[in-house]
Amino acid sequence: MNVLILGGNGMLGPWAVKAMKERHDILLTDINEPYPEYKGEYQKLSADDVDGVVKAAEGMDVIVNLSVLRPDRQFAFDVNMMGNYAMMVAAREHRIKRVITTGPHYQMAGQQYEEWDFDLIPDMPPAPGTRLYAHTKALGQEICRVFSARHGIQLITLLYYNMKHSWNLGGPEAPPVYHDDMVPYSTAWQDCGTAVQAAVEVPEERLATRSETFFILPDLPHGKFNNEKTKRVLGWVPRYHVEGLWNKEYRQPDSNLTEAF
Amino acid sequence: MNLLITSAASATAQLIAAALGEKHTLRLTDLSRKASGDIVSNELGHGSETDDLLAGIDTVINIGYQGQSGSAAHLMDYHTRRMYNLLQAASDAGIARYINVSTLRLYEDHEENLVVTEKWRTDPSAEDTELLAAHMAEYVCKEFARDRLIQVANLRLGWPFDGTGVGETAAISSDLIGAAVEEALISEELGQWQDIHVQSPVARQRFITKTAATLLPGLAGRLSS
Protein backbone atom coordinates (compact mmCIF):
# COMPACT_ATOMS: atom_id res chain seq x y z
CA MET A 1 0.00 0.00 0.00
CA ASN A 2 0.97 3.63 -0.39
CA VAL A 3 1.21 5.11 3.08
CA LEU A 4 1.55 8.80 3.89
CA ILE A 5 3.00 9.46 7.34
CA LEU A 6 2.57 12.90 8.88
CA GLY A 7 4.84 13.95 11.70
CA GLY A 8 7.14 11.05 10.98
CA ASN A 9 10.27 12.44 12.61
CA GLY A 10 9.04 12.27 16.16
CA MET A 11 9.77 9.50 18.61
CA LEU A 12 7.25 7.03 17.21
CA GLY A 13 7.87 7.63 13.52
CA PRO A 14 11.14 5.71 13.14
CA TRP A 15 9.62 2.65 14.82
CA ALA A 16 6.56 2.78 12.59
CA VAL A 17 8.79 3.10 9.54
CA LYS A 18 10.94 0.20 10.71
CA ALA A 19 7.85 -1.98 11.05
CA MET A 20 6.44 -1.09 7.63
CA LYS A 21 9.24 -0.16 5.26
CA GLU A 22 9.64 -3.60 3.70
CA ARG A 23 5.89 -4.08 3.35
CA HIS A 24 4.59 -0.74 2.06
CA ASP A 25 5.60 2.30 0.04
CA ILE A 26 6.02 5.10 2.51
CA LEU A 27 6.08 8.85 1.99
CA LEU A 28 7.44 10.24 5.23
CA THR A 29 6.72 13.89 6.05
CA ASP A 30 7.60 16.15 8.93
CA ILE A 31 8.19 19.82 9.64
CA ASN A 32 11.83 19.00 10.48
CA GLU A 33 14.63 17.54 8.41
CA PRO A 34 14.70 13.74 8.22
CA TYR A 35 17.00 11.60 10.29
CA PRO A 36 20.24 11.00 8.33
CA GLU A 37 19.66 7.26 8.65
CA TYR A 38 16.33 7.44 6.81
CA LYS A 39 16.74 6.53 3.15
CA GLY A 40 13.17 6.53 1.86
CA GLU A 41 10.85 9.08 0.26
CA TYR A 42 10.67 12.26 2.26
CA GLN A 43 8.87 15.58 2.06
CA LYS A 44 9.17 18.50 4.42
CA LEU A 45 5.61 19.34 5.44
CA SER A 46 3.82 20.68 8.47
CA ALA A 47 0.86 18.52 9.45
CA ASP A 48 -1.42 21.56 9.79
CA ASP A 49 -0.75 22.75 6.24
CA VAL A 50 -4.10 21.74 4.79
CA ASP A 51 -3.23 22.36 1.15
CA GLY A 52 0.16 20.70 1.53
CA VAL A 53 -1.29 17.60 3.17
CA VAL A 54 -3.99 17.35 0.50
CA LYS A 55 -1.31 17.47 -2.17
CA ALA A 56 0.93 14.95 -0.45
CA ALA A 57 -1.99 12.55 -0.01
CA GLU A 58 -2.65 12.15 -3.71
CA GLY A 59 -2.36 8.49 -4.68
CA MET A 60 -2.19 7.27 -1.10
CA ASP A 61 -4.12 4.35 0.33
CA VAL A 62 -3.66 5.21 3.99
CA ILE A 63 -2.69 8.30 5.95
CA VAL A 64 -0.99 7.90 9.33
CA ASN A 65 -0.78 10.95 11.55
CA LEU A 66 1.97 10.69 14.17
CA SER A 67 2.40 14.42 14.68
CA VAL A 68 2.58 15.72 18.23
CA LEU A 69 3.37 19.00 19.89
CA ARG A 70 2.73 19.43 23.56
CA PRO A 71 4.04 22.41 25.47
CA ASP A 72 3.13 25.47 23.42
CA ARG A 73 -0.53 26.38 23.30
CA GLN A 74 -0.55 27.75 19.75
CA PHE A 75 1.46 24.85 18.33
CA ALA A 76 -0.50 22.28 20.29
CA PHE A 77 -3.75 23.39 18.69
CA ASP A 78 -2.16 23.80 15.26
CA VAL A 79 -0.56 20.38 15.19
CA ASN A 80 -2.72 18.19 17.39
CA MET A 81 -6.05 19.50 16.15
CA MET A 82 -5.53 21.13 12.76
CA GLY A 83 -3.19 18.32 11.75
CA ASN A 84 -6.09 15.90 11.99
CA TYR A 85 -8.37 18.36 10.22
CA ALA A 86 -5.88 18.53 7.35
CA MET A 87 -5.62 14.75 7.25
CA MET A 88 -9.39 14.32 7.05
CA VAL A 89 -9.81 16.96 4.37
CA ALA A 90 -7.12 15.15 2.37
CA ALA A 91 -8.82 11.80 2.89
CA ARG A 92 -12.12 13.24 1.74
CA GLU A 93 -10.59 14.93 -1.31
CA HIS A 94 -8.81 11.79 -2.51
CA ARG A 95 -11.39 9.27 -1.26
CA ILE A 96 -8.79 7.60 0.92
CA LYS A 97 -10.53 4.87 2.83
CA ARG A 98 -8.41 4.60 5.96
CA VAL A 99 -6.72 7.04 8.28
CA ILE A 100 -4.80 6.29 11.44
CA THR A 101 -4.28 8.80 14.16
CA THR A 102 -2.28 8.48 17.34
CA GLY A 103 -2.26 10.14 20.71
CA PRO A 104 -1.98 9.78 24.45
CA HIS A 105 -4.31 7.56 26.47
CA TYR A 106 -5.80 10.51 28.27
CA GLN A 107 -7.28 12.08 25.20
CA MET A 108 -9.89 9.45 25.99
CA ALA A 109 -9.22 8.17 29.49
CA GLY A 110 -8.74 11.44 31.32
CA GLN A 111 -8.25 11.87 35.02
CA GLN A 112 -11.85 11.07 35.86
CA TYR A 113 -11.28 7.58 34.52
CA GLU A 114 -7.65 6.95 35.34
CA GLU A 115 -7.75 8.04 38.94
CA TRP A 116 -10.93 6.14 39.76
CA ASP A 117 -11.40 3.04 37.66
CA PHE A 118 -9.86 -0.22 36.48
CA ASP A 119 -10.25 -2.40 33.43
CA LEU A 120 -10.46 0.69 31.25
CA ILE A 121 -11.34 -0.12 27.66
CA PRO A 122 -10.86 1.95 24.51
CA ASP A 123 -14.57 2.15 23.71
CA MET A 124 -15.40 4.56 26.52
CA PRO A 125 -16.69 8.05 25.69
CA PRO A 126 -13.73 10.44 25.61
CA ALA A 127 -13.28 12.53 28.74
CA PRO A 128 -10.00 14.34 28.18
CA GLY A 129 -10.49 17.32 30.46
CA THR A 130 -8.53 20.51 29.96
CA ARG A 131 -4.87 19.49 30.11
CA LEU A 132 -3.45 20.98 26.95
CA TYR A 133 -2.01 17.85 25.35
CA ALA A 134 -5.00 15.64 26.11
CA HIS A 135 -7.48 18.33 25.19
CA THR A 136 -5.98 19.25 21.84
CA LYS A 137 -5.51 15.65 20.84
CA ALA A 138 -9.10 14.90 21.79
CA LEU A 139 -10.30 17.79 19.64
CA GLY A 140 -8.33 16.32 16.76
CA GLN A 141 -9.91 12.93 17.28
CA GLU A 142 -13.37 14.47 17.43
CA ILE A 143 -12.80 16.12 14.06
CA CYS A 144 -11.77 12.74 12.70
CA ARG A 145 -14.90 11.16 14.14
CA VAL A 146 -17.18 13.71 12.48
CA PHE A 147 -15.51 13.29 9.10
CA SER A 148 -15.55 9.52 9.49
CA ALA A 149 -19.27 9.53 10.27
CA ARG A 150 -20.05 11.79 7.34
CA HIS A 151 -17.79 10.32 4.70
CA GLY A 152 -17.37 6.70 5.71
CA ILE A 153 -13.63 7.05 6.15
CA GLN A 154 -12.28 4.27 8.34
CA LEU A 155 -10.72 5.89 11.39
CA ILE A 156 -8.33 3.95 13.60
CA THR A 157 -7.03 5.68 16.70
CA LEU A 158 -4.02 4.24 18.51
CA LEU A 159 -3.52 5.46 22.06
CA TYR A 160 -0.22 5.22 23.89
CA TYR A 161 0.97 6.26 27.31
CA ASN A 162 4.49 5.41 28.40
CA MET A 163 7.02 4.26 25.83
CA LYS A 164 10.10 2.30 26.86
CA HIS A 165 13.35 1.28 25.28
CA SER A 166 13.43 -2.48 25.09
CA TRP A 167 17.11 -2.67 26.02
CA ASN A 168 16.94 -0.95 29.40
CA LEU A 169 13.25 -0.13 29.95
CA GLY A 170 14.09 3.54 30.19
CA GLY A 171 12.08 6.24 28.53
CA PRO A 172 13.13 9.00 26.21
CA GLU A 173 12.86 11.64 28.91
CA ALA A 174 13.79 9.76 32.06
CA PRO A 175 16.29 7.15 33.19
CA PRO A 176 15.03 3.65 33.83
CA VAL A 177 13.54 2.83 37.23
CA TYR A 178 13.23 -0.87 37.89
CA HIS A 179 11.05 -2.84 40.28
CA ASP A 180 9.05 0.18 41.32
CA ASP A 181 5.61 1.73 40.91
CA MET A 182 5.51 1.88 37.13
CA VAL A 183 3.01 3.47 34.79
CA PRO A 184 0.59 0.58 34.26
CA TYR A 185 0.46 1.28 30.53
CA SER A 186 4.05 0.97 29.32
CA THR A 187 5.00 -0.28 25.90
CA ALA A 188 8.29 -0.97 24.16
CA TRP A 189 9.04 1.25 21.19
CA GLN A 190 9.25 -1.68 18.81
CA ASP A 191 5.76 -2.74 19.76
CA CYS A 192 4.50 0.81 19.39
CA GLY A 193 5.71 0.65 15.80
CA THR A 194 4.24 -2.74 14.99
CA ALA A 195 0.87 -1.50 16.26
CA VAL A 196 0.90 1.10 13.47
CA GLN A 197 1.69 -1.65 10.98
CA ALA A 198 -1.19 -3.72 12.37
CA ALA A 199 -3.57 -0.80 12.01
CA VAL A 200 -2.52 -0.22 8.41
CA GLU A 201 -2.99 -3.87 7.53
CA VAL A 202 -6.01 -4.99 9.56
CA PRO A 203 -8.76 -6.23 7.21
CA GLU A 204 -11.77 -3.96 7.09
CA GLU A 205 -14.14 -6.78 8.01
CA ARG A 206 -12.52 -7.08 11.43
CA LEU A 207 -13.42 -3.52 12.33
CA ALA A 208 -16.87 -3.29 13.87
CA THR A 209 -17.47 0.39 13.14
CA ARG A 210 -16.01 3.15 11.01
CA SER A 211 -14.25 4.58 14.06
CA GLU A 212 -12.25 2.21 16.24
CA THR A 213 -9.84 3.03 19.03
CA PHE A 214 -7.16 0.85 20.58
CA PHE A 215 -5.01 0.92 23.70
CA ILE A 216 -1.48 -0.11 22.76
CA LEU A 217 0.04 -1.87 25.71
CA PRO A 218 1.30 -5.38 26.43
CA ASP A 219 -0.22 -7.74 28.97
CA LEU A 220 0.39 -6.10 32.32
CA PRO A 221 -0.81 -7.44 35.66
CA HIS A 222 -2.22 -4.24 37.12
CA GLY A 223 -5.69 -4.57 35.61
CA LYS A 224 -5.83 -0.84 34.96
CA PHE A 225 -6.02 -0.71 31.18
CA ASN A 226 -7.40 -3.47 28.99
CA ASN A 227 -5.65 -4.49 25.76
CA GLU A 228 -7.94 -7.38 24.81
CA LYS A 229 -9.55 -5.58 21.89
CA THR A 230 -6.19 -4.57 20.48
CA LYS A 231 -4.92 -8.12 20.36
CA ARG A 232 -8.21 -9.59 19.14
CA VAL A 233 -9.05 -7.07 16.42
CA LEU A 234 -5.68 -5.85 15.23
CA GLY A 235 -4.00 -9.19 15.76
CA TRP A 236 -1.20 -7.25 17.40
CA VAL A 237 1.23 -9.37 19.38
CA PRO A 238 3.59 -7.38 21.60
CA ARG A 239 7.06 -8.81 21.83
CA TYR A 240 8.07 -7.06 25.04
CA HIS A 241 6.23 -7.18 28.33
CA VAL A 242 8.51 -4.86 30.33
CA GLU A 243 8.65 -7.34 33.19
CA GLY A 244 11.62 -5.69 34.83
CA LEU A 245 9.31 -2.83 35.72
CA TRP A 246 6.66 -4.84 37.51
CA ASN A 247 8.69 -7.68 39.09
CA LYS A 248 10.80 -7.26 42.20
CA GLU A 249 14.53 -7.81 41.96
CA TYR A 250 15.68 -11.28 41.10
CA ARG A 251 16.40 -13.08 44.31
CA GLN A 252 17.46 -16.46 45.61
CA PRO A 253 14.57 -18.28 47.37
CA ASP A 254 15.09 -18.94 51.08
CA SER A 255 14.89 -22.65 50.43
CA ASN A 256 17.70 -22.19 47.97
CA LEU A 257 15.68 -24.40 45.67
CA THR A 258 12.25 -23.30 44.52
CA GLU A 259 9.14 -21.51 45.74
CA ALA A 260 6.81 -23.74 43.77
CA PHE A 261 5.73 -25.83 46.78
CA MET B 1 -23.91 42.23 36.40
CA ASN B 2 -20.73 42.91 34.51
CA LEU B 3 -20.89 40.94 31.31
CA LEU B 4 -18.37 40.20 28.60
CA ILE B 5 -19.81 39.52 25.15
CA THR B 6 -17.47 38.05 22.53
CA SER B 7 -17.64 38.34 18.74
CA ALA B 8 -19.38 41.58 19.51
CA ALA B 9 -19.47 42.80 15.92
CA SER B 10 -21.68 39.88 14.92
CA ALA B 11 -25.42 40.17 14.47
CA THR B 12 -26.07 37.69 17.28
CA ALA B 13 -23.93 39.58 19.75
CA GLN B 14 -25.49 42.90 18.78
CA LEU B 15 -28.92 41.49 19.33
CA ILE B 16 -28.00 40.15 22.77
CA ALA B 17 -26.21 43.34 23.75
CA ALA B 18 -29.29 45.38 22.86
CA ALA B 19 -31.42 43.14 25.05
CA LEU B 20 -29.10 43.22 28.07
CA GLY B 21 -27.66 46.71 27.86
CA GLU B 22 -30.18 48.46 30.07
CA LYS B 23 -29.89 46.12 33.04
CA HIS B 24 -26.22 45.19 32.90
CA THR B 25 -22.82 46.68 32.33
CA LEU B 26 -21.47 45.31 29.09
CA ARG B 27 -17.93 44.86 27.86
CA LEU B 28 -17.95 44.07 24.18
CA THR B 29 -14.98 42.46 22.49
CA ASP B 30 -13.95 41.13 19.12
CA LEU B 31 -10.81 40.46 17.12
CA SER B 32 -8.89 43.55 16.07
CA ARG B 33 -9.98 43.33 12.45
CA LYS B 34 -13.61 43.60 13.49
CA ALA B 35 -13.48 45.80 16.55
CA SER B 36 -14.59 49.42 16.32
CA GLY B 37 -16.47 51.95 18.43
CA ASP B 38 -17.38 50.49 21.81
CA ILE B 39 -15.93 47.10 20.96
CA VAL B 40 -12.65 46.32 22.70
CA SER B 41 -10.09 44.75 20.42
CA ASN B 42 -8.71 41.48 21.75
CA GLU B 43 -7.18 38.48 20.01
CA LEU B 44 -8.04 36.07 22.84
CA GLY B 45 -4.46 34.92 23.01
CA HIS B 46 -2.93 33.04 25.91
CA GLY B 47 -1.14 36.05 27.32
CA SER B 48 -2.18 38.56 29.93
CA GLU B 49 -4.36 40.54 27.53
CA THR B 50 -7.12 37.98 27.88
CA ASP B 51 -6.77 38.06 31.66
CA ASP B 52 -7.12 41.82 31.54
CA LEU B 53 -10.20 41.55 29.38
CA LEU B 54 -11.92 39.52 32.08
CA ALA B 55 -11.07 41.76 35.03
CA GLY B 56 -14.22 42.50 36.98
CA ILE B 57 -16.46 40.37 34.77
CA ASP B 58 -19.20 38.26 36.39
CA THR B 59 -20.31 36.20 33.40
CA VAL B 60 -19.03 35.59 29.89
CA ILE B 61 -21.46 35.40 26.99
CA ASN B 62 -19.67 33.72 24.11
CA ILE B 63 -21.03 33.65 20.60
CA GLY B 64 -20.26 30.07 19.68
CA TYR B 65 -21.90 30.08 16.27
CA GLN B 66 -21.68 32.61 13.45
CA GLY B 67 -19.81 35.10 15.56
CA GLN B 68 -16.88 34.96 13.18
CA SER B 69 -16.33 34.66 9.46
CA GLY B 70 -13.38 33.70 7.33
CA SER B 71 -11.43 30.64 6.29
CA ALA B 72 -11.97 27.19 7.68
CA ALA B 73 -8.64 27.42 9.46
CA HIS B 74 -9.65 30.69 11.13
CA LEU B 75 -13.04 29.40 12.23
CA MET B 76 -11.57 26.23 13.67
CA ASP B 77 -8.81 28.13 15.43
CA TYR B 78 -11.16 30.73 16.87
CA HIS B 79 -13.65 28.22 18.21
CA THR B 80 -11.07 25.94 19.79
CA ARG B 81 -7.77 27.56 20.70
CA ARG B 82 -9.15 31.01 21.44
CA MET B 83 -12.09 29.50 23.33
CA TYR B 84 -9.61 27.49 25.36
CA ASN B 85 -7.69 30.66 26.16
CA LEU B 86 -10.86 32.52 27.12
CA LEU B 87 -12.18 29.71 29.28
CA GLN B 88 -8.83 29.23 30.98
CA ALA B 89 -8.59 32.93 31.75
CA ALA B 90 -12.20 33.01 32.93
CA SER B 91 -11.71 30.07 35.26
CA ASP B 92 -8.44 31.56 36.54
CA ALA B 93 -10.35 34.76 37.29
CA GLY B 94 -12.92 32.85 39.29
CA ILE B 95 -15.77 33.62 36.92
CA ALA B 96 -18.53 31.24 37.83
CA ARG B 97 -20.62 31.05 34.69
CA TYR B 98 -20.04 31.01 30.96
CA ILE B 99 -22.91 31.14 28.51
CA ASN B 100 -22.12 29.61 25.14
CA VAL B 101 -24.56 30.67 22.44
CA SER B 102 -24.73 27.75 20.05
CA THR B 103 -27.24 26.53 17.50
CA LEU B 104 -29.88 23.88 17.04
CA ARG B 105 -28.62 23.53 13.49
CA LEU B 106 -26.30 20.91 14.97
CA TYR B 107 -29.35 18.65 14.65
CA GLU B 108 -30.58 19.89 11.30
CA ASP B 109 -29.98 16.57 9.53
CA HIS B 110 -32.33 14.77 11.89
CA GLU B 111 -35.79 14.27 10.46
CA GLU B 112 -38.36 16.72 11.67
CA ASN B 113 -40.65 14.10 13.15
CA LEU B 114 -38.03 13.04 15.70
CA VAL B 115 -38.42 14.34 19.24
CA VAL B 116 -34.94 15.81 19.46
CA THR B 117 -34.06 17.04 22.93
CA GLU B 118 -30.94 17.87 24.90
CA LYS B 119 -30.47 14.13 25.42
CA TRP B 120 -29.70 13.61 21.73
CA ARG B 121 -26.15 13.66 20.42
CA THR B 122 -25.43 16.45 17.99
CA ASP B 123 -24.58 15.51 14.43
CA PRO B 124 -22.60 18.33 12.84
CA SER B 125 -21.73 18.49 9.19
CA ALA B 126 -18.09 18.07 8.25
CA GLU B 127 -18.63 20.31 5.23
CA ASP B 128 -20.19 23.34 6.90
CA THR B 129 -17.21 24.68 8.80
CA GLU B 130 -19.35 27.14 10.78
CA LEU B 131 -21.31 24.21 12.16
CA LEU B 132 -18.26 22.06 12.74
CA ALA B 133 -16.63 24.97 14.56
CA ALA B 134 -19.74 25.46 16.71
CA HIS B 135 -19.56 21.79 17.62
CA MET B 136 -15.90 22.09 18.53
CA ALA B 137 -16.59 25.16 20.67
CA GLU B 138 -19.14 23.13 22.61
CA TYR B 139 -16.54 20.38 23.05
CA VAL B 140 -14.00 22.80 24.52
CA CYS B 141 -16.60 24.30 26.86
CA LYS B 142 -17.76 20.91 28.07
CA GLU B 143 -14.27 19.85 29.12
CA PHE B 144 -13.87 22.96 31.24
CA ALA B 145 -17.19 22.17 32.87
CA ARG B 146 -16.19 18.54 33.28
CA ASP B 147 -13.06 19.61 35.14
CA ARG B 148 -15.31 21.86 37.26
CA LEU B 149 -13.34 24.93 36.37
CA ILE B 150 -16.42 26.88 35.31
CA GLN B 151 -20.15 26.34 34.89
CA VAL B 152 -21.30 26.40 31.28
CA ALA B 153 -24.82 27.04 30.05
CA ASN B 154 -24.92 25.92 26.43
CA LEU B 155 -27.84 27.65 24.74
CA ARG B 156 -28.67 26.09 21.41
CA LEU B 157 -30.84 28.59 19.60
CA GLY B 158 -33.27 27.92 16.80
CA TRP B 159 -32.94 29.32 13.31
CA PRO B 160 -33.51 31.54 11.49
CA PHE B 161 -33.76 34.54 13.75
CA ASP B 162 -37.14 36.24 13.41
CA GLY B 163 -38.14 33.86 10.67
CA THR B 164 -41.83 33.76 9.86
CA GLY B 165 -41.80 31.86 6.62
CA VAL B 166 -43.50 28.59 5.90
CA GLY B 167 -41.27 25.69 6.85
CA GLU B 168 -39.20 27.71 9.30
CA THR B 169 -40.12 25.30 12.02
CA ALA B 170 -37.09 26.02 14.20
CA ALA B 171 -37.35 29.81 14.12
CA ILE B 172 -36.62 31.97 17.13
CA SER B 173 -37.54 35.58 17.74
CA SER B 174 -34.99 38.18 18.69
CA ASP B 175 -36.77 39.01 21.89
CA LEU B 176 -36.76 35.36 22.95
CA ILE B 177 -33.01 35.20 22.37
CA GLY B 178 -32.44 38.16 24.64
CA ALA B 179 -34.80 36.80 27.26
CA ALA B 180 -33.18 33.36 27.18
CA VAL B 181 -29.71 34.79 27.74
CA GLU B 182 -31.04 37.02 30.54
CA GLU B 183 -32.59 34.00 32.23
CA ALA B 184 -29.44 31.94 31.79
CA LEU B 185 -27.55 34.65 33.66
CA ILE B 186 -29.66 34.31 36.77
CA SER B 187 -31.04 30.79 36.83
CA GLU B 188 -30.10 28.78 39.91
CA GLU B 189 -31.23 25.53 38.36
CA LEU B 190 -28.35 24.88 36.01
CA GLY B 191 -25.93 21.96 36.13
CA GLN B 192 -22.20 22.26 35.73
CA TRP B 193 -22.70 21.61 32.01
CA GLN B 194 -26.17 22.49 30.87
CA ASP B 195 -27.54 22.17 27.38
CA ILE B 196 -30.72 24.18 26.80
CA HIS B 197 -32.67 24.25 23.55
CA VAL B 198 -34.61 27.39 22.77
CA GLN B 199 -36.91 28.21 19.89
CA SER B 200 -40.12 30.12 19.46
CA PRO B 201 -43.53 28.51 19.47
CA VAL B 202 -44.28 28.27 15.76
CA ALA B 203 -46.43 26.11 13.57
CA ARG B 204 -45.11 22.54 13.46
CA GLN B 205 -42.47 23.48 16.04
CA ARG B 206 -39.39 21.36 15.42
CA PHE B 207 -37.68 21.23 18.83
CA ILE B 208 -39.41 20.90 22.15
CA THR B 209 -38.34 23.40 24.79
CA LYS B 210 -39.30 21.64 27.99
CA THR B 211 -35.83 21.98 29.51
CA ALA B 212 -35.80 25.71 28.86
CA ALA B 213 -39.22 26.08 30.45
CA THR B 214 -38.03 24.18 33.51
CA LEU B 215 -34.62 25.75 34.00
CA LEU B 216 -35.41 29.25 32.77
CA PRO B 217 -38.77 29.87 34.43
CA GLY B 218 -38.78 33.50 33.41
CA LEU B 219 -39.49 32.33 29.89
CA ALA B 220 -42.87 30.97 30.97
CA GLY B 221 -45.50 31.98 28.50
CA ARG B 222 -42.98 32.60 25.74
CA LEU B 223 -42.36 28.94 24.98
CA SER B 224 -44.76 26.33 23.74
CA SER B 225 -46.54 24.48 26.47
Image: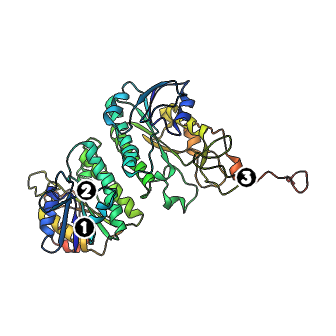
- Tell me the crowding category of disc 1: few under 14, some 14 to 19, or many 20 or more residues within 10 angstroms, Cα based: many
Mark identifier at residue A89: none
The subunit letter for the residue under badge 2 reads: B
Q: CA distance from mark 3 to mark 1?
A: 57 Å
Quadrant (top left/top right/bottom left/bottom right) for the C terminus of chain B: bottom left
Left or right of B78? Residue A100 is right
**Kind of residue sitting beneath label 2:** Gly
Question: Mark 3 belongs to which amino acid?
Answer: Asn
Q: Considering the numbered disc 2 on the image, is that residue within a helix, a strand or a loop? A: loop
Residue occupied by mark 2 = B64
- Determine if marks 2 and 1 fall on one subunit: yes
Query: Same chain for the residues at labels 2 and 3, yes or no?
Result: no
Q: Are marks 3 and 1 on the same chain?
A: no
Above or below — where is A233 with respect to A107? Answer: above
| Quarter of the rendering containing residue A6 | top left
Q: Which residue is disc 3 drawn over?
A: A247
Alpha-carbon distance for marks 2 and 3? Answer: 51 Å
What residue is drawn where x is 66% and y is 45%? A169
Q: Which mark is residue B212?
A: 1
Mark whose residue sits in front, 2 or 1:
2
Residue A132 left/right relative to A187: left
Query: Residue A21 is drawn in which quadrant?
Result: top right
Identify the amino acid type marked 1: Ala
